[in-house]
Amino acid sequence: MPGDENELIIPAREGTLQVLPCLARAAVRRVVITSSMARHRLRPSSRKAHPFDETNWTNLGWRVDVQPYVKSKTLAERAAWDFIAREGGGLELSVVNPAGVFGPALGPDFSGSIDIIRALLDGSHAGGAEDLFRPGRRARRRRSASARHDQSPAAKGERFIAVAGEPMSILEIARVLRRELGSAARRVPRFQAPDWVVRLAARRNPVACATP
């Protein structure tokens, strides 16, 4: 978590707005932006449960604090769509919003998705696995999805949530790790944490225990 949320928001939004005009001037036909399902993180209403889809956006006026990462992804994508509407000319836009992306890490600077696995392996969940569900997608499939959206005429002006299969609970992910890694997964939790334990942990690390 940055000390100032603008450490994430400004690079995300301004970086997007620097690239798009260059592509428009170069007569590029279509740009595919890989954003994040984080921009769907909070539903428009806290009281009405309903399925959400690509048309939903994170409500930045939510009654609770919106995490800086979530805010940065939301504002950057909104800026992209606003640019296309105002100054895009012939430039087409398609946006892929992947859920958790899992696969081989390219270096020690882990993404938030990979950090879920790291936390399970290093004993951070000693009190048990939270009763949370995480949708996911393999990294290689995310790249192939972006390529399809680059080529398909139907992807013009569309947003897509990229997720593979049904969401898995943290406990189900833990079971997979134990089965596949054997002794290397000895610190992975074997039971589900009671809700009161999760609430206590959230006071110390609210991001790790945040729910959509």
Image: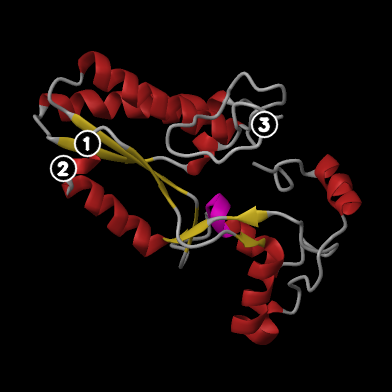
Q: Amino acid at mark 2?
A: Pro
Identify the magenta region.
110-114
- Residue drawn at the location 33% of the way across and 18% of the way down: 82
**The C terminus appears in which quarter of the rendering?**
top right
Q: Give the residue pinned by disc 2.
A: 153
Residue 56 within the segment the image draws in magenta: no
Q: CA distance from mark 3 to mark 2?
A: 35 Å
In depth, the one of 26 and 144 nearer the eye is 144
Q: Are marks 2 and 1 in contact (CB under 8 Å)?
A: yes
Are the two marked residues, 3 and 2, in contact with CB atoms closer than 8 angstroms?
no
- Mark 3 vs 1: CB contact within 8 A: no
In this rendering, the answer to whether 82 lies above or below 190 is above
Q: CA distance from mark 3 to mark 1?
A: 31 Å
Q: Position of residue 185 (x, y in %)?
A: 69, 78
Q: Which residue is mark 1?
A: 156
Residues under labels 2 and 1: Cα distance?
6 Å
Instruction: Specify few, some or many for label 2: CA neighbours under 10 Å numbering under 14, 14-19, or 20 or more.
Output: few
Question: Which one is earlier in the sequence, the residue at label 3 or at label 2?
Answer: 3
* Res. 48 mark: 3
